[in-house]
Amino acid sequence: MEHKTPSGLKTGGRKLWKAVTDDFELGEHELSVLLEASRTVDALEALEVIIRSEGVTHQSPQGVRAHPALVEARQQRVTLAKLVASLRIPLDDAQGEGRLPQQRSGVRAISGVA
């Protein structure tokens, strides 16, 4: 089943969305996680533009500090890693060398309470 790319995603976010939805069947909750991951990729790209333009440090009243965009990019990378890991997307052969394989089981159902 093909899922339309959500509006508002930029280049990186659209690439991630398409790559994952082309290769994997995702449930609605997983699509929500993928959307947030795609938005995070876009945020990282925007932060990278700022960092390239302004540098990795800035002058503050306390002296030279890490640029706030650099600090935020670090936080966004952590968020992205957690979002992608929660999708349990298997790594390709080159990325997965020396790692334990991730297993992606089929569609998960919610079990009812009787």
Image: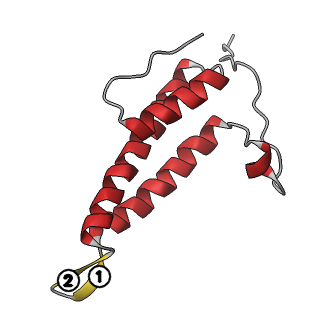
Q: Which mark is residue 65?
A: 1
Marks 1 and 2: CB-CB under 8 Å? yes
- Residue 13, compared with residue 79, is above or below; it is above
x, y (%) of residue 91?
Answer: 73, 43
Residue at 75%, 31% (x, y): give it: 104
Disc on res. 59:
2
10 vs 108, nearest the viewer = 10
Residue 79 visible in rendering? yes
Answer with left or right where residue 32 lies relative to residue 64. Answer: right
In the shown orientation, is residue 70 left or right of residue 24? left
* Residue extending farthest bottom: 63
Q: Tell which of 103 and 23 is nearer to you.
A: 23
Q: Amino acid at mark 1?
A: Arg
Neighbor class of circle 2 (other Cα within 10 Å; few <14, some 14-19, many 20+) is few
Q: Residue at x 82, y 44 (%)?
A: 101
User: Which quadrant of the view contains residue 19?
Assistant: top right
Q: Quarter holding the N terminus?
A: top right
Q: Quadrant of residue 70 in the image?
A: bottom left
Please tell me whether residue 75 is drawn above or below residue 15 in the rendered image: below
Q: Is residue 62 left or right of residue 103?
A: left
User: Where is residue 107 drawn, in percent x and y?
Assistant: 70, 18
Q: Tag 1: Cα neighbours inside 10 Å, few (<14), some, or many (≥20)?
A: few
Comes first in the chain, label 1 or label 2:
2
